[in-house]
Image (cartoon, rainbow, N blue to C red):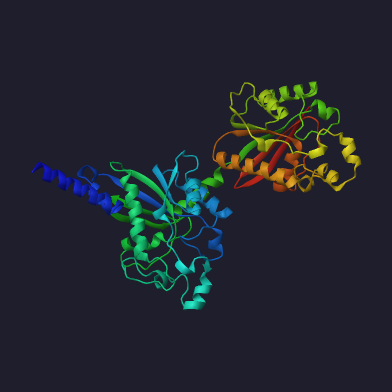
Amino acid sequence: MKNTIKSLATLFLVTAMTWGPISAFAASVSKSDEAKVLRFYLVRHGQTYSNIKEMTIGGGGNAQLTQKGRYDASNLGLGLADVSFIAGYSSTLGRAYETANQILRGRNMPVTQIENLKDISWGDAEGGRIDDLTGKFGHSGNDFEFYFGKFNDPSFKSPVNAENMYQFSERFEGALKQIASQHQGQSGNILVTAHSSMAFYLQKYRGDKPLSGLSNTSVSVLELKDGKFSLVDFNNTEYLKSGYAKEKQLPPLDITLVINPMTILSKAGVMEGTSDSDFTAQGIKANQQLNSDLKNTRFIAAYSSELDRGYKTAEAVLAGHKQTLIKDENLNEMFLGHWEAEKIATIKASDSQAAKDLFSADRVIHFLSPDDGENGDIAAFRLDSLLSKIGYQYEFSKGNVAVFTHPLIVKAFLNKRVPDYRLPESDGVQVIKLQYKNEAFNVKDVKVIK
């Protein structure tokens, strides 16, 4: 008898494993879990370039978020700031994953990707356009039931061999139950970012209401209680509006951009790109003065170039701040090839277009090295990439970020991102008060210390 019971238990375990996450989830709901409530905040990803072009890109393709899409997602995060999430999940498509990370910015919460949260497949119509379908079938691509059927019709055959609504709904619900199984015994809110096709699955909870799509960065809330789902909210865009209202009240992020002071080579009239030298007495004095000027500034992060004159400037200026300094090669000065350690007078005397660009405050970005040096636009791009990354990371934080770098690369960067501004020539420490907000940079002030 004992062996029989043991065999039946083994059979039940193997069968449950074979049935997969949905059956396993149903079997796992216990009386102790009945009082627990999980709320899934289902968010459609931000605007993509394929959305703008009205393309039929579903589970078989991906398009990046636009600038609006990224910032909508970030502001939705502000709108959801009062919602405490216990976990974050997204589909495996980049547009959903990036949206989730933008929403959770500053929460230090990882995003787990799940394949079955992917968008519905458009089949043979993947990569087309809405108008193409209208011309071919007489039905707009927005006539979803024509192309995908209904959520409760497993036998529907799509005219474009697309995944039908029933198949999609089954796998999507399976993904939600898979997530729920990871949070047994818990109550709380779970972020799930996916796609407009979530509306197809949610239709089963909307009664007789007509099928409706989901707006980019809209929020729908599905509650799981006693093993059953119920729809609490659908296609809510008020969270996004609230986030934008909060964002308008936030000041821009201050970035203190410091250009190293005079060195021995620069005083001697020698070209310093990645070439390096110690500070002159004047340079040392300027660093000490800047340290005194910034002693009451609260820095939340600090970065410097790997070159000694950048790193030593940072060490001198930040002495007493107890701030960890991060070296980054993207802050290094432009590499000038055979013009490295050349007399500046000799380079200017060449009367070449490259020399004219290099020594022009508004043309550095156009500098093309005469041999194996670095081009101005490439230097501008690497500094822009790092400063944008810093801006994104700390934008909603209180404080100031210190960045220590060099004159040529800063001029090239300003040509790219603040083209109406011209950085004046100076042999002292230049301190640029740079502001970042909504992926844009602005020069607030410039101070020179000699």
441 or 65, which is in the foreground? 65
Q: Position of residue 352 (x, y in %)?
A: 88, 46
372 or 325, which is in the foreground? 372
Residue at position x 15%, y 43% from top? 6
Is there any visible trace of residue 227 in the rendered image?
A: no
Q: Position of residue 427 (x, y in %)?
A: 81, 31
Residue at position x 36%, y 45% from top? 189
Numbered label tally: 0
Describe residue 399's horizontal placement relative to residue 158 as left or right: right
Is there any visible trace of residue 60 in the rendered image?
A: yes
Q: Position of residue 295 (x, y in %)?
A: 64, 24
Q: Position of residue 198 (x, y in %)?
A: 40, 59
The answer to which quarter of the image holds residue 182 is top left
The answer to which quarter of the image holds residue 278 is top right
Residue at the left extreme of this rendering: 1
The answer to which quarter of the image holds residue 232 is bottom left
Describe residue 356's horizontal placement relative to residue 79 as left or right: right
Position of the N terminus by quadrant: top left
Position of the C terminus by quadrant: top right
Describe residue 116's horizontal placement relative to residue 305 as left or right: left
